[in-house]
Image (cartoon, grey):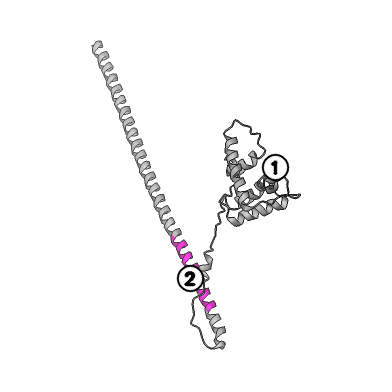
Amino acid sequence: MNLRPPPHHNIHSSGGGGSGRREDCWSEGATAALIEAWGDRYLRLNRGNLRQKDWQEVADAVNSRQTGVKPRKTDVQCKNRIDTLKKKYKLERSKPPPSKWPFFSRIDSLIGGNASVYKKHPSVTFTIKPKTASLLKEPKSTESSFDDDDGDDDEVRKEHRVEDVGLSDGAACRELARAILKFGEIYERIESSKQQQMMELEKQRMEFTKDLEFQRMNMLVDAQLEMEKSKRQKHLNRSGKKQ
C-alpha cells in the first residue's frame, strides 16, 4: 500500500498574489502620504473629526501616491493607521527628547503642543455706515397712476431733499451760535470776576499804604515833639544854673 503525503497548502495565499505581506502593512512612504492627506483635511475641519467621505478621500490620496503593485488601502485601514500613529506619538512623547521616530515632528505639529501655531484666528470685520445717508434719505411719496407725473414727483423729492439739508445745516448753525454765545457769556463773567478781584486787591493795597504813611507821619511828629521837649528842658536847666 502506497502512502501519499498530504498536499501542501500555500500559507501565503491570503496575502494576495503570494507576496507574503499583510494587506494592512504600511510602508514608510505610504505612512507619510497618509499623514499628509489626513493632516490637510484635519486642519481644514478646524481639527474636527473626519467623516466617512473624508476618510475615503484620504484613502484615494494615499492610493494615488503609491507605486507598483500593492494592495489598495481602504478608508477603515487609513483610520485605524491614524489611531495607531496617535498612540505611537503619545508613547514617544512620554520618552526623553529628542524622538528618533521620523513622523514625530509632523504629528506633533498637528495634535501636539505646537498645534496652536496652525490655528486660524477669527477675522473681525467692521462696517461703517455713513450718517449723511440719513440726511439725504428721500421721503416716501404716494404713487401715481399717471406716467406724466413722474417728473413732478422727482422735482418734489429734490425740493424735500434741499429743505432737509437746509434745515439740518440751519439747525447746526443755530446750535453753534448758541454755543459761541454761551462761551462768550462765561468768558465775560470770568473776566468781570477777575477785574473785581483786582480792584479789591488794589483798594486793600492803597488802604494799607495809607495806614503805613499815617503811622510814619505820627512817628515823625512824635519824634519832633520829643526833640522839642528835650531842647526846652536843656534850655531851662541852663537858665536855672546861671541864676
Q: In this view, does 129 lie to the left or right of 205?
A: right
**211 left or right, relative to 130:** left
Q: Say which of marks 2 and 1 sits in front.
A: 1
Q: How many labels does the image show?
A: 2
What is the span of residues highlighted in magenta in the rendered image? 157-178
Front-most of residues 28 and 22: 22
Taking depth in this image into account, of 42 and 79 the one nearest to the observer is 79
Quick one: SS at disc 1?
helix
Residue 167: mark in rendering? 2
104 vs 124, left or right, is right
* C-alpha gap between disc 2 and disc 1: 79 Å
Assess whether residue 88 is covered by the magenta stretch. no
Q: Which residue lies furthest to the right in this view?
A: 68
Q: Is mark 2 on a helix, strand or loop?
A: helix
The circle on residue 28 is 1
Identity, as a three-letter code, of the amino acid under mark 2: Leu
Residue 1: x percent and y percent?
72, 43
Q: Residue 84, position in %: x, y?
A: 60, 43
In front of the other: 198 or 181? 181
- Placement of 164 over or under 229, stated as above or below: below
Q: Height in image: 95 above or below 58? A: above
Asked if the magenta segment contains residue 176, the reply would be: yes
- Horizontal side of residue 237 vs 158, given as left or right: left
Q: How busy is the neighbourhood of tag 1: few (under 14 within 10 Å), some, or many (20 plus)?
A: few
The structure residue drawn at horizontal position 50% and vertical position 74%, both measured from the top left corner, is 163
Q: For the point 66% across and 34% down, which residue is it?
A: 100
Q: Are there few (<14), some (14-19), or many (20+) residues within 10 Å of tag 2?
A: few
In which image quadrant can residue 226 be found? top left
- Vertical arrangement, residue 141 with respect to residue 218, above or below: below
Give the amino acid type for the residue marked by disc 1 in the picture.
Glu
User: Residue visible at 53% across and 66% down?
Assistant: 132
Question: Marks 2 and 1: CB-CB under 8 Å?
Answer: no
